[in-house]
Image (cartoon, rainbow, N blue to C red):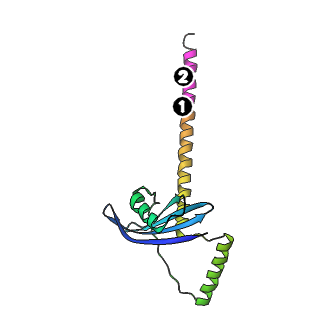
Amino acid sequence: MLASYIKLKLIKFNMKQYTIKVTVLLENTFWIGVFERNDKDGYAVAKNIFGSEPTDAELYDFIFAHFEKLRFTQPQDFKLIIKRKNHKRMLREVKREMEKAKQGLSSTTHAQEVLRIDLEKNKKLKKVNTKAQKEAEREEKFQQKQQKRKQKHRGH
């Protein structure tokens, strides 16, 4: 998995200031941009699929042209807890993470976790909406059948 990072400080859109971090990843055959936004509301993430690998200039242009169109998740509050570790232990953990990355078993980042939670929430909402729509269609069909039955027996 190849990745490149860009961090933009305090971009102004609609009189709001944002701090944006863009991570460009190669997943399977697609270049994916993960946009992380920090502002006073909280932490939000959006994802966009690019065709070919975007350059830094293309990313800047994309952000300035299409920032409003990005679908960010609901802002979430989180506290960053930094624990001091022994430097040797930290090196061992980095080595393990690098081995996982080589094998394709990379651990999830906070942005990926937020996207996964948002995807699960959207799945549940869609399931509820679909179920309600099917129930409404079933009820409408039943009412139509009842109406037909009444019309058939009307003249007798």
For the point 44% across and 72% down, the residue is 7
Q: Where is residue 129 in the image (x, y as percent from the top left)?
A: 53, 45
Mark 1 → mark 2, Cα distance in angstroms:
11 Å
What residue is rendered at 53% in x and 84% in y?
83
| Quadrant of the image occupied by residue 11 | bottom left
Callout 1: SS: helix
Residue ID at (64%, 77%): 98
The part of the chain drawn in magenta is 139-152
Question: 31 or 13: which is nearer to us?
Answer: 31
Q: Do the residues labelled 1 and 2 touch (CB within 8 Å)?
A: no
Q: Name the residue under label 2.
A: 147
Placement of 94 over or under 18, stated as above or below: below
Q: Which residue is drawn at 45% across and 60% down?
A: 74
Q: Residues within 10 Å of mark 2 (few under 14, many from 20)?
A: few
Most frequent secondary structure within the magenta stretch: helix
Instruction: Look at the picture and state if 147 lies above or below 63.
Output: above
For the C terminus, the image quarter is: top right
